[in-house]
């Protein structure tokens, strides 16, 4: 049963991170919204590999990830591509430069940014 709890948690998490509603994800993989709700609430004892593969495809992740317990940092690394990460880093550096030009004092914004990048969400 623990596997279904992990699966349900990961489906919810990646659905949320992709900005998908239950209805939209259910439509994409060809099941009813009610059935998806039951999967996410662990009211279904198990699902087949074919359905799990459809979930993974719709959520843009590898199938095995649906069964892995993950921390927040791992999930963010999967979602943010290297290209997007570099773009985000460049934009944050521009914001820091802009804040310094406007005299925002002695805040060590670069150190703060480094901490945020190392620990997404401020957690390790």
Image (cartoon, grey):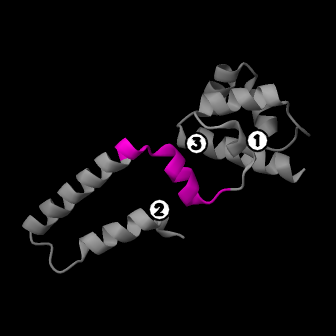
Q: Earlier in the sequence, mark 3 or mark 1?
A: 3
Residue picked out by circle 3: 16
Q: Earlier in the sequence, mark 3 or mark 2?
A: 3
Magenta-drawn stretch contains 76: yes
Q: Earlier in the sequence, mark 1 or mark 2?
A: 1
The quarter holding residue 107 reads: bottom left
Q: Which residue is mark 1?
A: 40
In the rendered image, which residue does mark 2 sit on? Answer: 120
Question: Is 85 rendered above or below residue 107?
Answer: above
The C terminus, quarter of image:
bottom right
**Separation of disc 3 and disc 1 at Cα?**
12 Å
Element marked by disc 2: helix
At 37% from the left and 49% from the top, the residue drawn is 85
- Does 16 appear above or below 55? below
Checking the image for residue 48, the label placed there is none
Residue at image point 69% right, 31% down: 55
Alpha carbon of mark 1 to alpha carbon of mark 2: how far?
Answer: 25 Å
Magenta span covers which residues? Answer: 70-84
Majority secondary structure in the magenta region: helix
List x then y, in percent, for residue 79: 50, 44
Residue 87 position, x and y percent, is 29, 46
């Amino acid at each position: 049963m623990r596997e279904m709890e992990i699966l349900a948690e990961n489906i919810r998490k990646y659905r949320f991170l992709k900005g998908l509603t239950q209805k939209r994800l259910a439509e994409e993989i060809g099941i009813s919204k009610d059935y998806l709700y039951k999967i996410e609430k662990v009211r279904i004892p198990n699902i087949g590999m074919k359905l799990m593969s459809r979930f993974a495809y719709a959520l843009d992740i590898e199938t095995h990830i649906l069964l892995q317990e993950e921390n927040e940092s791992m999930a963010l690394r999967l979602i943010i591509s290297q290209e997007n990460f570099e773009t985000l880093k460049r934009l944050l550096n521009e914001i820091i430069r802009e804040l310094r030009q406007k005299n925002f004092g002695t805040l060590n914004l670069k150190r703060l940014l480094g901490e945020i990048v190392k620990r997404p969400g401020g957690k390790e």
